[in-house]
Image (cartoon, rainbow, N blue to C red):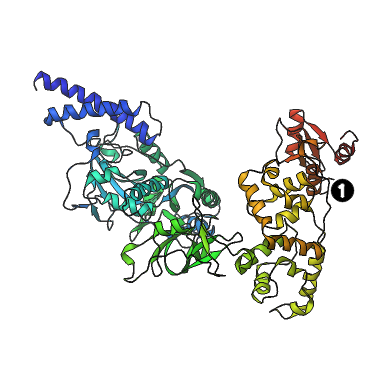
């Protein structure tokens, strides 16, 4: 080798070593050690050198990650060791782990007297299985699982994954095949879709599909742009110990070695002794599932001892020593039967896709929100479409995307109606707003139903037993048109309703009677003025003291109330500017609704203004809610947790950590008597 080439070779080797090391810190450990620009500089230097000395090029060079030539197809690769599938425990309940453990124990010939069996519990990643083959420490081939016997050669694309080592440390065996899952994180998937939208290109369906598509890209440059990642979970062919290969006793130990060699191994891998520990793992991961940055569809249990694994062997294409324990799927396909537009209490129009019933995320879903016009248009959901529905955790089911290839020929795009689908009033979308709103107000029966339910809820005037079914009937039968109509209901009218027993009718009338004695904040909140929640209603009541003062306040006067900003002030003024709303208030008063009115008291003049209280434990006579109301009426703020800013803690029986904290911080502690004394102090 000429001297110059020798020099270049040394330089190239050094650059590659540095870049490998930094790529590992960046992609696998998520802890870059040098700035990106520095990495880029070294990378370019290497590229320049490799271009000048083509004879020094090598497939394990970091420059090979950016993707080589476009392929015309994928070559088929026969796996040296078949890629098995994994038995799925059909019982999705906890007992699935028990059944697996019982089977393993039986096959190992263990009795009850024998000790617990050790397993490894892992996540079941929802991606694609690949086999990575290293010879003399260099990545030489990567293949998909295919039918388990042979898969496709995706080496070029796999090289673009920063998380996959292109070369291994010196203690790696002559032949090593690492198996694991290629996947895409959910946030990376979202970002990719945002980019697609920005470019006006079609969006992807889900992370798994996108990862699969990227891996099977014939143009590695495109694959290189897809944010793919990898987790190692097993082994294929490996130099045997008698030929100097590694000696591992357990699966866990094997995973630790892979990690040391630079492969990403999920941090949730755990050893578990016996079925109970597996059940606990299954439950723990279920709770964690939605907060993981990537999709999983279950957990996998594997016998930890490799000797015992060998002893158990396989049945058909599945090992006897491993099992997958699935969770309910979070995404399913279904078809859109219709797109309805629902009207909420404040008149907001929400497009909702009516779906052919589908079991997803543990429940049967028949509706999925499309949120608003822009969202519906962005996803371009049409009646008859096949769609991906997602329900994760407790969140509302959502249409993720449409399968464009399955669209029926004459499917019409969805358009937002410009009139209310319930009452026919004009529906308007104001500038800068995402939502259309029905302008019908309480003339609109949908808004009326929601308004009545809002008024009757526990936190407002509370009419016990007045639920959505009953409100639906009362409004549809035309018996209740406005809130005051509730108080004009008689036994006769109620008796005519479906499924209304005399006793329930009587109970409802009593509940209505009881609700007449209310408080000003509850009443104001119950009116359902847009942007006026419970806290604002309380602030208004405290500030103005009397309903008429609130009704007649100008925007400027309203702005004096703490926590009331311009949007809220305008909303209140607009509400009371409408004659029919004032009429409702007058009629409710005429029906006997009453509350204690006070003197208008500017907040700062209140005795406990600026003081913060925390109530904990149970007080002898007052409920916590009552104590809170008393304090707030005196201008105090009632907080949920104790801090240095707390002025007083009111403690009752069985006060716990909050009392401890108050004492630790030296905050004054009052009992109920102390609180009442403070409220009664003349100086206050
Ligand atoms: S072990 C002999 N471990 O599940 C067992 N597989 O049918 C071979 N998978 O498509 C697989 N996470 O890609 C194993 N922690 C994990 C896994 C896992 C996901 C997938 C794998 C394959 C299927 C096995």
Q: Is residue 532 visible?
A: no
Q: Looking at the picture, tell me which residue is in the foreground, 629 or 650.
A: 629
Question: Looking at the image, which residue sits at the far left?
Answer: 2
Question: Looking at the image, which residue sits at the far right?
Answer: 682
| Image quadrant containing the C terminus | top right
Determine the secondary structure under disc 1: loop
Q: Is mark 1 within 8 Å of ligand 1?
A: no
On the image, the x and y values in percent for residue 533 come to: 67, 51
Q: Residue at 71% of width from left, 43% of height from top?
A: 557
Mark 1: few/some/many CA within 10 Å (<14, 14-19, 20+): few
On the image, the x and y values in percent for residue 120 come to: 46, 46
Q: Which residue is mark 1?
A: 621
Q: Residue at 47% of width from left, 46% of height from top?
A: 292
On the image, the x and y values in percent for residue 23 come to: 32, 32
On the image, the x and y values in percent for residue 634 come to: 81, 41
Label tally: 1
Q: Is residue 665 left or right of residue 227?
A: right
| Image quadrant containing the N terminus | top left
Q: Is residue 606 left or right of residue 534?
A: right
Q: Looking at the picture, tell me which residue is in the foreground, 663 or 461.
A: 461
**481 shown above or below 212:** below
- Name which quarter of the figure residue 45 lies in: top left
Question: Looking at the image, which residue sits at the far top?
Answer: 3
Q: Looking at the picture, tell me which residue is in the foreground, 648 or 110.
A: 648
Q: Is residue 98 visible?
A: yes
**287 shown above or below 560:** below
Q: Residue at 77% of width from left, 53% of height from top?
A: 548
**401 shown above or below 482:** above
């Amino acid at each position: 080798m000429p001297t110059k080439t020798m020099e270049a070779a040394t330089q190239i080797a050094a650059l590659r070593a540095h870049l490998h090391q930094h790529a590992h810190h960046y992609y696998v450990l998520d802890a870059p050690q040098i700035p990106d620009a520095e990495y880029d500089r070294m990378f370019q230097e290497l590229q320049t050198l490799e271009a000048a000395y083509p004879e020094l090029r090598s497939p394990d060079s970091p420059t090979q990650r950016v993707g080589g030539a476009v392929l015309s197809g994928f070559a088929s690769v026969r796996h040296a060791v078949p890629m098995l599938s994994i038995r799925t425990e059909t019982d999705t309940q906890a007992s699935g782990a028990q059944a697996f453990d019982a089977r393993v124990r039986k096959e190992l010939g263990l009795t009850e007297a024998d000790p617990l069996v050790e397993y490894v519990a892992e996540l079941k990643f929802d991606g694609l299985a690949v086999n990575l083959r290293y010879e003399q420490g260099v990545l030489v081939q990567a293949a998909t699982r295919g039918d388990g016997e042979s898969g496709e050669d995706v080496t070029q694309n796999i090289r673009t994954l920063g998380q996959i080592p292109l070369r291994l440390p010196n203690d790696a065996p002559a032949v090593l095949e690492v198996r694991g899952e290629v996947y895409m994180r959910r946030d990376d998937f979202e970002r990719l879709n945002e980019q697609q939208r920005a470019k006006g290109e079609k969006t992807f369906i889900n992370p798994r599909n996108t990862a699969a598509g990227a891996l099977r890209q014939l143009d590695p440059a495109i694959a290189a742009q897809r944010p793919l990642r990898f987790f190692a979970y097993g082994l294929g062919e490996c130099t045997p110990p008698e030929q100097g290969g590694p000696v591992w006793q357990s699966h866990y130990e094997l995973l630790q070695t892979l990690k040391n060699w630079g492969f990403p191994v999920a941090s949730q891998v755990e050893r578990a002794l016996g079925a109970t520990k597996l059940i606990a793992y299954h439950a723990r991961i279920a709770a964690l599932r939605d907060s993981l940055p990537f999709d999983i569809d279950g957990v996998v249990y594997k016998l930890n001892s490799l000797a015992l694994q060998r002893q158990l062997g396989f049945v058909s294409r599945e090992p006897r020593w491993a099992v997958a324990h699935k969770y309910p799927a979070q995404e399913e396909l279904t078809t859109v039967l219709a797109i309805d537009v629902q009207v909420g209490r404040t008149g907001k129009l929400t497009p909702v896709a009516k779906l052919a019933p589908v079991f997803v995320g543990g429940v049967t879903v028949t509706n999925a929100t499309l949120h608003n016009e822009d969202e519906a248009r962005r996803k371009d959901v049409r009646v008859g479409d096949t769609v991906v529905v997602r329900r994760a955790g407790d969140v509302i089911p959502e249409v993720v995307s449409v399968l464009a290839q399955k669209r029926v020929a004459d499917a019409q795009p969805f358009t937002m109606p410009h009139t209310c689908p319930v009452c026919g009033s004009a529906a308007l979308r104001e500038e800068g707003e995402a939502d259309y709103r029905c302008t019908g107000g309480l003339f609109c029966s949908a808004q009326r139903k929601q308004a009545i339910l809002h008024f009757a809820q526990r936190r407002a005037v509370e009419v016990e037993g007045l639920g959505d079914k009953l409100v639906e009937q009362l409004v549809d039968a035309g018996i209740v048109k406005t809130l005051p109509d509730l108080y004009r209901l008689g036994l006769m009218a109620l008796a005519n309703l479906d499924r209304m027993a005399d006793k329930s009718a009587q109970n409802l009338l009593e509940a209505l009677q009881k609700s007449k004695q209310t408080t000003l904040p509850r009443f104001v909140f119950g009116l359902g003025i847009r942007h006026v929640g419970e806290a604002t209603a309380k602030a208004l009541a405290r500030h103005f003291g009397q309903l008429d003062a609130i009704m007649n306040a100008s925007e400027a006067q309203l702005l004096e109330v703490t926590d009331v900003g311009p949007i809220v002030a305008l909303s209140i003024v607009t509400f009371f500017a409408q004659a029919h709303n004032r009429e409702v208030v007058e009629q409710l008063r005429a029906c006997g609704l009453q509350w204690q009115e006070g003197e208008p008291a500017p907040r700062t003049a209140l005795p406990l203004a600026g003081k913060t209280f925390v109530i904990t434990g149970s007080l002898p006579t007052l409920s916590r809610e009552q104590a809170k109301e008393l304090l707030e009426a005196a201008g105090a703020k009632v907080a949920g947790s104790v801090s240095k800013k707390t002025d007083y803690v009111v403690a009752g029986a069985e006060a716990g950590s909050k009392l401890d904290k108050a004492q630790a911080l030296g905050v004054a502690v009052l009992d109920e008597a102390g609180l009442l004394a403070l409220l009664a102090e003349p100086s206050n």
